[in-house]
Image (cartoon, rainbow, N blue to C red):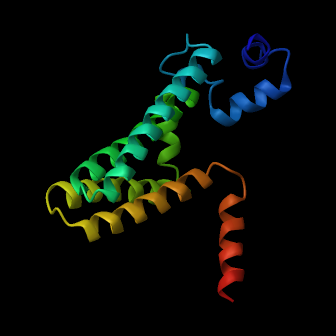
Amino acid sequence: MDSIRNAFTDVEKSDTAQIVGNVLGTNKEEDSCCPSMDWSTRLQGFAFCFGIGLILSLGGSINIFLMNYPAFAILYSLGTIVSLCSSMFLRGPIAQLKSMVEPTRAITTAVMLTFTVLTIVAGLVLKNGVLCILFFVIQYLSCIWYMLSYIPFARDAVKKCFGNCIN
């Protein structure tokens, strides 16, 4: 673990750490809410939050088979939000929020958050299972599309793959 931490904290000696820090936006102290957090702490925070989000989402998914739509809507949507917040440990909250509203991600972020809210509304207020599942599917697909935006050329590859499948 020390070798990994040293690779990311000793930016002067490692070009790879400089590149990774630039990509994640962690080399900018002004964007970081908690500049005193070292990489080990950031990775632990990310893993913990992502794990909690995954557990909440899985718990919600179990409720869909029990036809408990309110519990599904709350747990799954909360899991999505907690998992999304886990990336803030890696980049910092301000840098992550700035990244979410960049032109390449703004529409996807808006769709993802809108359908997260609509999933909760369909499950809690409307108690409509069909709408809840429809909104969940759109929320899930937009979340995948959002995550693909962080991988270079991933969206283009997916578009080309589906384009070839349709033709």
Q: Residue furthest bottom?
A: 167
Please identify the quadrant where the C terminus is shown.
bottom right
Residue drawn at (61%, 54%) of the image: 148
Q: Residue at x 57, y 30 (%)?
A: 91
Q: Is residue 66 above or below residue 17?
A: below
The answer to which quarter of the image holds residue 111 is bottom left
Please state which of residues 132 and 89 is positioned toward the viewer in this rendering.
132
At horizontal 57% and vertical 21% (from top left) the residue drawn is: 44
Is 133 placed above or below 22 here? below
Q: Position of residue 37 (x, y in %)?
A: 56, 13
Residue shown at 74% from the left, 19% from the top: 8
Q: Nearer the viewer, residue 143 or 60?
A: 60
Q: Position of residue 118 (x, y in %)?
A: 27, 59
Quarter of the image for the N terminus: give it.
Answer: top right
In this image, 49 relative to 3: left or right? left
Q: Position of residue 157 (x, y in %)?
A: 72, 66
As drawn, the residue found furthest toward the front would be: 66
Is residue 130 rendered to the left or right of residue 39?
A: left
